[in-house]
Image (cartoon, rainbow, N blue to C red):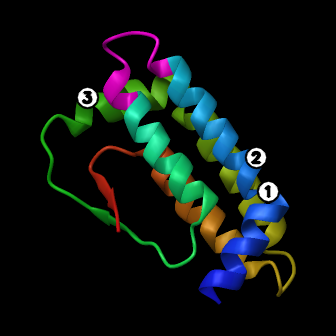
Amino acid sequence: MGCLGNILWFVFGGFLSAIGWFLVGCVWCITIVGIPIGLQCFKIAGLSLWPFGKEVVPSNRTGSLILNILWLIFGGLELALNHLLWGLLLSITIIGIPFGQQHFKLAKLALVPFGAEII
């Protein structure tokens, strides 16, 4: 399911989702203070392109609380709500459930991207 799921995901919305994450990352990278947040957005954009077969696990990095609060205030909530909406819409049909689960994974990551590691 991984390869076929990734191809279908890319064609039917994964590319647009990744563009959104990439644009948010570019906006964050304009300032020097926002570069760590922008780099995390670029990592999530890569996950948004090919989410099947990848997992998000918690990590124990320091400083993640402050960055998560800044992220949530300045952009994370909108991206999380977008993924949550698409996840709910895709979960209506049986065929869309795996794609909805990927959107839920991205929504959770959009709320708290720092302190999480993509494997």
Circle 2 residue = 16
Q: Is 77 displayed left or right of 89 in the figure?
A: left
Q: Which mark is residue 66?
A: 3
Circle 1 residue = 13
Disc 2 vs disc 3: which is toward the camera? 2
Q: Could you give the CA–CA distance between mark 3 and mark 1, rounded to whole angstroms?
A: 31 Å
Label 3 Cα crowd, 10 Å radius (few <14 / some 14-19 / many 20+): few
Q: How many marks overall?
A: 3
Q: On screen, 56 above or below 93?
A: above
Q: Could you give the CA–CA distance between mark 2 and mark 3, rounded to whole angstroms?
A: 29 Å
Q: Who comes first in sequence, dot 2 or dot 3?
A: 2
Q: Secondary structure at mark 3?
A: helix
Is 29 inside the magenta-drawn segment? yes
If the image is split into quadrants, where does the C terminus sit? bottom left
Q: On screen, 45 above or below 91?
A: above
Q: Is 42 displayed left or right of 99 in the figure?
A: left
Q: Which mark is residue 77?
A: none
User: Residues in magenta?
Assistant: 28-37
Is 25 inside the magenta-drawn segment? no
